[in-house]
Image: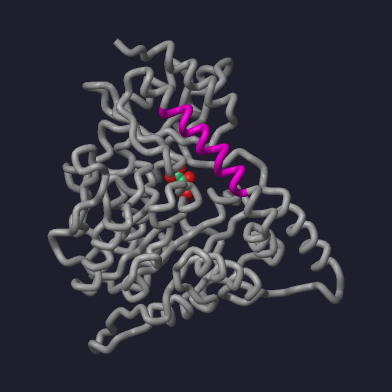
Amino acid sequence: MARVNPNYSKLKAGYLFPEIGRRVRAYQVAHPEQKVIRMGIGDVVLPIPEAVRIAMHQAVDEVGTLSGFRGYGPDLGYDFLREAIAKEYVSRGAQVHADEIFVSDGSKCDTGNIQELFAFDATIALTDPVYPVYVDTNVMAGRTGELGDNGQYAGLEYLPMNAANGFVPPLPKTSPEVIYLCSPNNPTGTVMTRAELTEWVNYAQKNKSIILFDSAYEAYIQDPSLPRSIYEIPGARKVAIEFRSFSKTAGFTGIRCAYTVIPLELEGVGPDGAPVSMHALWNRRHGTKFNGVSYPVQRGAEAVFSPEGKEQVRAMVGYYLENARLMRNGLIEMGFEVFGGTNAPYIWLKTPQGVDSWAFFDKLLQSVQVVGTPGAGFGPSGEGYFRLSAFALRETVHEALSRMSTQFKKK
Ligand code: MLT
């Protein structure tokens, strides 16, 4: 019999969101009459912007003609999209060139696959709570030991984020080679300030670490003083890879398009001690394992940067942020301690005293049929917290708040 990758057996639970889906399905089977409200996985609900739809239609028509037909696209993405992305970065004060952009089918894949570029025994630091993809992919790759009773995998450095430190990750105690950061943060909905991010860039320069910076939710930053890209910070081009996505920005969770930026000057070190271009490695990996995103989808993504596209995206993001504002206010009125949700689409709330996050999940599901995400699913420091997603229709938000207010009343 073929021997399997033993590292998979270290993964003690299923992936978080399918696990939630499984529990909700079981509840629905037992209670088919109940209407469940889903605010667990951060999946968008509004249709794609009109400018995107029109551009995709045109592209489909184009490839239906002999002269407009396209086969395999360039591995790294069409120039028209890479150039539109670079122009947007530059307009916001971040130096990114079109040839440093790798177009892909999603940031989940990119943040999950990027670890392949690092040594088998590279040291890793990540925040806790954290987007589970960063942890699980390193476990699968064999870069960790077993899961301990403390909920942490041996061999990873966890950087705890909690109310006491304002959900700002402390600098590592070890000197990790690779550091995962996410801002606006999934799951806490908090955003790193320019000063905080500068501290991280300086740290990475001093320790020769590489920061993997996930900014999939950057479109939700409204406060102009907050950085939307790590490349707004001087020195970041030498220490950071950035991941961005059209999923939450422009409703692409089902369409699939994202991009990763690897500056040409970013280097790791090879087995002989010589510097190695990270851009060249990812280029090599992309060329071997990826055949690009479809032409109509890339044309749709390009339209996000057109004047109409930008306006429509602004409206869409504004809609979800208004949901988040209503949710924050409603939950505060119910007596919850609430974080995030002002420059991010996630609300992170403290569960009631003595109720752990899965118990709170069950209580909400059973009593008011509202689904959220238990904080413990994002790591041990997420215990005692709960995430609600603002990606919902307005009437759903009102309904969820009204149902919850029957159970939770400020004393
Ligand atoms: C989430 O709910 O955390 C996200 O939707 C997951 C993802 O983007 O893969």
Q: Which residues are magenta?
A: 313-328
Q: Is residue 154 above or below residue 336?
A: below
Residue 405 in the image: x percent, y percent?
43, 14
- Name the image colouring: one colour
Residue 199 in the image: x percent, y percent?
24, 61
Hey, which quadrant is residue 71 in on the image? bottom right
Q: Please tell me whether the stretch drawn in magenta is mainly helix, strand or loop.
A: helix
Foreground residue among 92 and 72: 92
In the figure, is residue 325 to the left or right of 310? Answer: left
Q: What residue do we see at 54% from left, 70% from top?
A: 86
How many marks can you see? 0
In the figure, is residue 354 to the left or right of 17? Answer: left
Please say whether residue 362 is visible from this viewpoint: yes
Q: What residue do we see at 40% from left, 35% from top?
A: 347
Q: What residue do we see at 30% from left, 27% from top?
A: 337
Q: What residue do we see at 67% from left, 60% from top?
A: 306
Hey, which quadrant is residue 237 in on the image? bottom left
Q: Is residue 167 above or below residue 74?
A: above
In the figure, is residue 356 to the left or right of 24? Answer: left
Residue 94 in the image: x percent, y percent?
45, 68
- Within the magenta stretch, is there residue 353? no
Q: Is residue 131 above or below residue 171?
A: above
Foreground residue among 367 and 8: 367
Quarter of the picture containing the C terminus is top left
Farthest-out residue, left: 173
Quarter of the picture containing the N terminus is bottom left
In the figure, is residue 341 to the left or right of 37? Answer: left
Foreground residue among 124 and 164: 164
Please say whether residue 291 is visible from this viewpoint: no
Residue 74 in the image: x percent, y percent?
62, 77
